[in-house]
Image (cartoon, grey):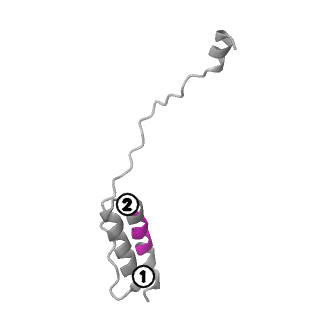
Amino acid sequence: MTFERWRCAVTEPTRYSTPPVELPLRLEPDPAPVEGCAGCAELANVRDRARMVGDMTTVSDCNVHMRRHPEGHQ
């Protein structure tokens, strides 16, 4: 491939004139387990162990499950 042909194949990078999107920092407290619920207690234990080893993905997953879990606490 000649230089001229290669130069035509290379494109300029896309440049955006808009600023980056800033997402809000959520500082909600962790959901509390419902007393007497074995499911909530297990999720809280997993969340605590995950936080100790720095696994914030699992901490977040446990929080989501705990927030959705109360539907079964009738």
- Picture residue at 40% right of the left edge, 64% below the top: 60
Name which residue type carries label 2: Asp
Total number of numbered labels? 2
Horizontal and vertical percent position of residue 1: 70, 14
> Which residue corresponds to the image point at 35% horizontal and 83% vertical from the top-left?
34
SS majority, magenta:
helix
Which comes before the other along the chain, label 1 or label 2? 1
Q: Is residue 32 above or below residue 19?
A: below
- Residues 23 and 12: in front is 12
Name the one closer to the observer, 16 or 64. Answer: 64
The residue pinned by badge 1 equals 39
**Nearer the observer, disc 1 or disc 2?**
2
- Amino acid identity at mark 1: Gly
Quadrant assignment, res 19: top left
Mark 1 and mark 2 residues within 8 Å of each other at the beta carbon:
no
Quarter holding the C terminus is bottom left
Residue at 44 percent across and 78 percent down: it is 69
Point out residue 16 in the picture as x, y percentages from the top left corner. 49, 31
Q: Residue shown at 34%/72% (left/top)?
A: 31
Give, as a single range, the part of the protein colored magenta. 60-66
Q: Residues within 10 Å of mark 2 (few under 14, many from 20)?
A: few
Q: CA distance from mark 1 to mark 2?
A: 20 Å
Q: Which residue is mark 2?
A: 55
The quarter holding residue 38 reads: bottom left
Q: Is residue 46 on the magenta stretch?
A: no
Counting from the top left corner in percent of width and height, residue 20 is at: 42, 39
Q: Which residue is at the far front? A: 53
